[in-house]
Amino acid sequence: MVFLVLKFLHILMVVMGVGALIAEYVLLTVHKRSEENEQRRASEKMAYVLVKKVASPALLLAFLFGLGMALTNMTYFKLPHMHVKMLLALFLVGLPHMEGANLRKMLVAAEAKDEVLINTLKKRHSTYMVAGSVLVLAIFYLIIFKPF
């Protein structure tokens, strides 16, 4: 029963964390070229709050619940694909922290009215989103197909 509760919480936190990452990316891209500076700044602040308050804690909890599942059922440690999955999940946990730092720099640049730096940071953020998407897809592939 404990294993099932951990599995439920793990999946729930993954959905929340990845959903928050997608939502913050959408917030940044919707007003990316908006002429209304106030809307752009508001969307950047909301994206930062999503990453800091939802994505980071949810993905960290997902990792901890997943580790709890593995400790509850030690056979997970005997499966080679689970070692790779755990490593990728660890990278995925670190991604919102990198995004949060990038968004913080973006907010500081917005106060200084440095549009060039803001656009550079938004491009970097797009790269983070691609990296996160690849990580999520790789993790799902490993879970479903168990290639080795």
Image (cartoon, helix red, strand yellow):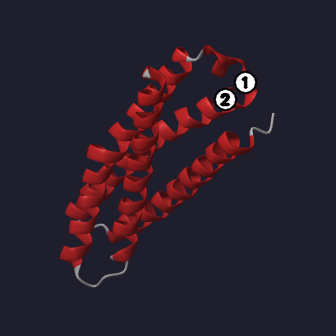
Question: In this image, 90 relative to 44: left or right?
Answer: right
Question: In this image, 140 relative to 43: left or right?
Answer: right
Q: Secondary structure at mark 2?
A: helix
Does 112 appear above or below 85?
Answer: below
Outermost residue to the bottom = 35
Outermost residue to the right = 148
**In the picture, residue 76 is in which quadrant?**
top right
- Within 10 Å of the Cα at label 2, are there few (<14), some (14-19), or many (20+) other Cα atoms? some
**Can see residue 68?**
yes
Q: Amino acid at mark 1?
A: Leu
**In the picture, residue 83 is in which quadrant?**
top right
Compare residues 39 and 124 and report the one nearer the observer. 39
Q: Which mark is residue 18?
A: none
Does 13 appear above or below 42?
Answer: above
Q: Position of residue 139 (x, y in %)?
A: 62, 43
Q: Secondary structure at mark 1?
A: loop
Say which quadrant the N terminus sits in. Answer: top left
Q: CA distance from mark 2 to mark 1?
A: 5 Å
Q: Residue at x 41, y 45 (%)?
A: 96
Outermost residue to the front = 1
Q: Do labels 2 and 1 touch, CB within 8 Å?
A: yes
Q: Position of residue 55 (x, y in %)?
A: 36, 46
Q: Residue at x 25, y 64 (%)?
A: 110
Q: Residue at x 43, y 60 (%)?
A: 22
**In the picture, residue 33 is in which quadrant?**
bottom left
Q: Position of residue 109 (x, y in %)?
A: 28, 60
Compare residues 1 and 79 and report the one nearer the observer. 1
- Within 10 Å of the Cα at label 1, are there few (<14), some (14-19), or many (20+) other Cα atoms? few
What residue is pinned by disc 1? 79
**Can see residue 109?**
no
What residue is pinned by disc 2? 82
Q: Amino acid at mark 2?
A: Met
